[in-house]
Amino acid sequence: MMLGFNEPEFLSQTASAVALRPQIEELVDRLVDEGFDNLFLVGAGGTYAQMWPYEHLARRASSLPVRSAIAAELIVSGDVTLGERSVVIFTSVSGTTDDSIRAIEYCKARGAYTVGFTGYADSPIAKSVDVALISEPKTWPFDMQMLLFMGRLLARRGEFDGYEKLADELAGIPGVLVEVAKQAEPVAAAFAEAHKDSDYHFLVGGGNLWGFTYLYSMCILEEMQWLRTTRVHSAEFFHGSLELIEKDTSVIIFQGEDETRPLTDRVEAFAKRVSEDVTVFDTRDYPLEGISPEFRGLLAPLVLDTVLSRVSKHLERVRDHSLDLRRYYRVMEY
């Protein structure tokens, strides 16, 4: 029995995201056939950070200009390349994120074509974008939709040969992730028990896990647990932040399976020389039955989101601090 885990709901929500494949492919095919010059991936907070793996994928594999952008900053700073030949993607669990709603209007006013992924067809974001693709309510994360969108786009551009195979395998991802959650449960419980009284965590990740590192630090440990954190990219670790690590510092390392793995290995080796409290969450530890080896790296953010969601529930338990509790976010005017 997993703490606070509704397996039928998890399976249904994840399946609803994967089931968008035909709509996503139809959309991508139409956009490619009509032609566009650049792609913007726009979000706020966690939905901004969750765009980074797909900007990273595009930089590695494609000549198409792809930029992730913070909704509020895009509005005030603009982007000279944003215009009638641009496509802009937004994601929002609730479909009510104010910064994203304003950014949609900003992009549309400049002639860009807007796409929204959310769980509510009648939400402001779903009603504002040119096309909305709707999963079940509260479906998170958006990696399934973004993998399908970016995979199909790169495939149509001749930049990704394995898309059909990947998309076929993603059909089994709901069950795969349930097994990940089950395997992670004792690990998560042990971490939470050991860190019940830790008030500071140092988080490190790289490659397509840098976005998740940022997200887990800011949106979960800080926003939902009121814990102090430092987050640093594994490639930047040795340029300042390492000075904060002491013998008793909780260092959390997110390790994936892409080409940046050696960067994070180097951090792990150093951290373990200094701190006696280093925890590594490594996607290699999870079998992912039915997923081909060449796709494991792409799925790292999705796998670790599942693993760390178990950690979050156990931190909530041992610290007696609800993940839904906020002091300021959407509570105070700002």
Image: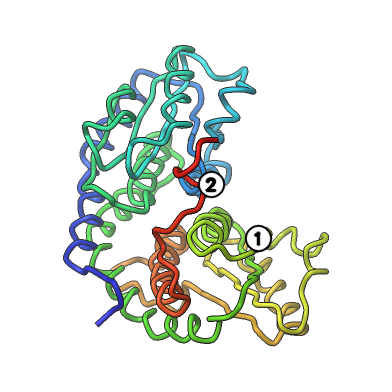
Between 210 and 217, the one nearer to me in the picture: 217
Nearer to me, 221 or 303: 221
- Residue nearest the viewer, comparing 216 with 170: 216
Residue name at image x 49 percent, y 46 percent: 329
Residue 247 position within the rendered picture, expressed as x and y whole percent measured from the top left: 76, 84
Above or below: residue 227 compared with residue 223: below
Q: With 200 as the anchor, is 270 left or right in this view?
A: right
Q: Residues within 10 Å of mark 2 (few under 14, many from 20)?
A: many
> Up-down: is 2 above or below 258?
below
Q: CA distance from mark 1 to mark 2?
A: 15 Å
Q: Is residue 3 above or below residue 235?
A: below
Which amino acid type corresponds to the residue marked 1 in the rendered image? Arg
Label 1 crowd (10 A; few <14 / some 14-19 / many >=20): many
Mark before the other along the chain sequence, 1 or 2:
2
Quadrant of the rendered image containing residue 242: bottom right
Residue 231 numbered mark, or none: 1
Q: Nearer the viewer, residue 315 or 52?
A: 315
Question: Which residue is at a point 35% across and 24% down the rendered structure image?
Answer: 31
Helix, strand or loop at label 2? It is helix
Which mark is in front, 1 or 2?
A: 1
Q: Quadrant of residue 174?
A: bottom left
Percent coordinates x, y for residue 274 in the rendering: 77, 83
For residue 215, side relative to residue 168 (left or right): right
Residue beneath label 2, please? 52
Q: Position of residue 28 (x, y in %)?
A: 33, 31
Q: Position of residue 11 (x, y in %)?
A: 21, 62
Vertical order, 289 against 158 (above or below): below
